[in-house]
Image (cartoon, rainbow, N blue to C red):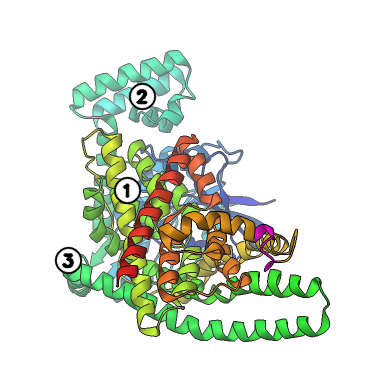
Amino acid sequence: MGKTVALVGPPNVGKTTLMSRLCGVKVEVGNWPGVTVERKTCRYEHGNTTYKIVDLPGLYSLTGSSEDQRVAISYLLGGYGEKPDTVVVVGDPFSLERSVALLMEVAELGYHHLVFAVNMMDEARRKGIHVDLDGLEEKLGVPVVGTSAKSGEGVDRLKRAIADVAEGRVEPKPVTPDYPEPIERAVERLTSEHGIPRWAAIRALEGVEEILERLPEGVREEVRDLRRKVEKELGRPVREATEDARRETAYRIVSETVETREDGFELQDRLDKILTHPVYGTVTALTVLAAVFWIAFTLGGFLEDAIDGLLDVLKTLSTTHLHEPFRSLVNQGLIEGVGTVLSLYPYVFLLLLLLTMLEDSGYTARVAALAAPLMARFGLHGKTVFPVAISLSCNVPAVTGTRIIEDPRARLLSAVTIPFVPCSARLAVITFLTAKMPPGLRVPAAVAIYAVALAAFLGSAALLDGLLHRGKRSTGGHVIELPRLRRPHPRTVLTVTWIRSKEFLEKAGTTVLAVSLALWAASKYPQPIGTGRSATEVLGHALATVTGPVLGLGWKEAVALVNGIAAKETVVSTLTMLNAHLSPDKAFVLALVTTLYFPCVATLASLWSETGSLKWPAISLAWSLAVATVIGAAVHAALTLT
């Protein structure tokens, strides 16, 4: 018989890496039913028992109203058809109070089968931090295990602790905070008169809707009356009082069990002052970004040449051994279409690899903190920087990732404007087209395109914010936590990079393949391309009556833009199959327009799902087309005059 174990902990404590250590790299990724919050599960064997690990969203508390917190509470209460047999609360030595307070919250939900994992112990030792694990276990009343998910330290001990608790060989008695007397009286009344468990009474008094909804209507009203009376007596909200009580208890426990050597943080503090400085931090961030592009373009070029060589061999074999129409189907529909996109995979992989390294090192959070005040000036919530970082990989999860923003209007603003941020598919297009330019201009051209896209994103956000708030700008309030700077872990970086980049390969085998085959058919019927009567030429020439005068783009580029609506990678395959010859100026304009115009179909569908209305995808589609046309026309005119 199997056991279910929930992993709970704040962000940036290495929870997902620890999960990977427990189970290996085979982690199942999906969404929680009915929402777009990511769900990760895996399994491992210990003794004769199979343990299923469920990684709950990273959170600081169970008392908030964000989608992540609602999912976590609902799961722990059995709202998804199962309840964990054991809960592992994960913390790190650098901010242990947060996880200790979270452990008390989980215990108040009725879970006594708890294990506390103090992760990143190797980093703590390097920073001069000593954690008295035995003393911490005594004060928390639950098994405590020190781990290092990156090296595997303590993982076997953690498995044994989980098994001991799940099998009932160890009976934890979790610590409880001391709440103010008015709260204790109200809790006692609810438990004695209505039989409500203590944990449910506390949560109900805090106003947690998931708990209140489970109470009879009459009891619900009594709870609300009690809460008003308690808050009047305390002079502040119940939730604030209970959170303070947990924090005070957590601080006392940690101060008695954790010793910190001050000089262990000196270098960290000095680096943070530089990396988050308005001037030095900005210069550093721009330098790092330029270095990322340079490395990706340089190394990616060598790998692309190798793949192109292999594709040439395949094309030669096809030409030698196949007859028409199969020869052109394989050469044009498959090798030139799908193969060209695959040859760009090294660039995508390297870019995502470097970004993941920066994320795992903790540097991305510094850039987020640096950019947050800028985001606020354009009406964006500070947390928008995280979906923006995700959107560099793919806009689809970035749009769904705006769920971390609690304010509905701020969330809408981010979801509608984020599609302007170039994803990995558009990186492939930018890479392909900037390669048509002189070598010395390729990286500056790519950086310029990203800068224009960022300006379009921020400018659109400011405009939409003004319309939504009718002249009253939002504050964009934000609080961003800075995790400790650390060396990226190769296993974690490679695993995350593969998960993110394989979507590019999957799309090459589905959407790009379908569009390539359709384009091949359209180029052959009703008459072959070159006669002026193929479906491709008819469509292209009709569109070129607009794209030619306005953007300087011919019929082949116009067809590529139409196909790019399905998936941006198909712009590359279309241009290759049509044997389009692009001047440097035309390539730059096309790269710019492709980056800015229509979001792909999947992104529009995600935006529809998030907003619950077709209005916002339609607005996003029309506005992005207008922005791309205006900017593309301006750049074309400027290049024509030079």
Task: Give the image location of residue 430, x and y in percent.
Answer: 45, 69
Quarter holding the C terminus is: bottom left
Left or right placement of residue 624 versus residue 428 in this view: left
Residue drawn 41% across and 57% down? 550
The segment highlighted magenta reads: 529-536
Residue drawn 59% across and 50% down? 4
Position of 359 relative to 411 (above/below): below
| Mark before the other along the chain sequence, 3 or 2 | 2
- The secondary structure type at the circle numbered 2 is helix
Residue drawn 28% across and 43% down? 463
Choose mark 1 or mark 2, whichever is in front: 1
| Mark before the other along the chain sequence, 1 or 3 | 3
Instruction: Give the class, few, some or many, for how many residues have Cα within 10 Å of label 2's Cα (few <14, many ≥20).
Output: some
Task: Give the image location of residue 306, x and y in percent.
Answer: 58, 86
Q: Nearer the viewer, residue 581 or 620?
A: 581
Instruction: Give the class, few, some or many, for how many residues have Cα within 10 Å of label 1's Cα (few <14, many ≥20).
Output: many
Residue 188 - label:
2
Task: Give the image location of residue 147, x and y in percent.
Answer: 43, 67
Q: What's the residue type where badge 3 is placed?
A: His
Left or right placement of residue 12 versus residue 373 in this view: right
